[in-house]
Amino acid sequence: MPAHLLQIAKKLGHDAGLLALDYQKKGFKIETKGSSFNFVTEADKACEKLIVDSIRHNFPDHSILSEEMGEIKGNGEYKWIIDPIDGTTNFAHGQPIFGISIGIVKNGKPIIGVVEIPALKESFWAMEGKGAYLGNKRLQVSKVAETSGALFATGFPYSRAERYEKNMELFDAFYKNSHGVRRFGAASVDLCFLAAGRFDAYWEFDLKAWDIAAGKIIVEEAGGTVTNMDGSTLDPKRGSLLSSNSLLHQQMLNILKKHGADRI
Ligand code: IPD
Ligand code: CA
Ligand code: CA
């Protein structure tokens, strides 16, 4: 079953990716949700429909949690966790850094992650115990062992006002003693780039289950570590995330603690 699920998840990521690119070319309607800088586009909804309709057709007993649509409760052991377009702000501004993120958990345990980055023609995926891949290439996190030699990524969540100071403080702390800090604007892409050794660590507050579900297993299967910012087991409801190449994890936890980020 998992191999069959993986094939379907990859195909859905691929097809939704092409659909998103098509919308980016021809144009789309944009609405806001919650704040003037949190968008949902016609493309988010169309990609979500493509993915969700296919899951419901192929696996009517599977549960689904998808960002725009919410939750559909099934009565099977599998649950799909979907972000139809992760990086919507980038997408809406015509930028290439956005991903289709599809995670599958079995009885609550992540077993499959697929992140399609269509504008880069990159397909990341992982299966529990079988490794993480970019296309056919097996992925391994970097071997950088000192923060002074690391390239970091972070993200600034929609909870801008609440997190402004802590985000700036951490950016400053890691920026000063590293090769730099990038802020690409798509959590699933940040996690995949960490898995591929393009970043050495990534942190962000207030993420949601659909931002993380696929990327977490891709990082772990590439040898990385993903926890809350206090080092505890990642709780998607809490949303505080530190991910690293494992070698840097403790050093980063120490710095996060020094700045009080472990209490968030
Ligand atoms: C967002 C992106 C962004 C991150 C935000 C997420 P969305 O997802 O992943 O990088 O900083 O926290 O909510 O809204 O584009 O799907
Ligand atoms: Ca997202
Ligand atoms: Ca999204």
Image (cartoon, helix red, strand yellow):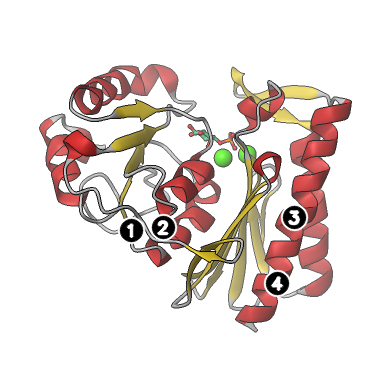
**Residue, disc 4:** 7
Q: State which tag comes first along the sequence, 2 or 3.
A: 3
Q: Are marks 4 and 3 in contact (CB under 8 Å)?
A: no
Residue type indicated by callout 1:
Gly
Name above or below for residue 215 compared with residue 256: below
Q: State which tag comes first along the sequence, 1 or 4.
A: 4
Q: Residue at x 49, y 50 (%)?
A: 192
Secondary structure under tag 1 reads loop
**Foreground of the two, 109 or 89:** 89
Residue type indicated by callout 4:
Gln
Q: Residue at x 43, y 27 (%)?
A: 156
**Foreground of the two, 145 or 94:** 145
Q: State which tag comes first along the sequence, 4 or 3.
A: 4
Q: State which tag comes first along the sequence, 3 or 1.
A: 3
**Residue, disc 2:** 219
Secondary structure under tag 4 reads helix
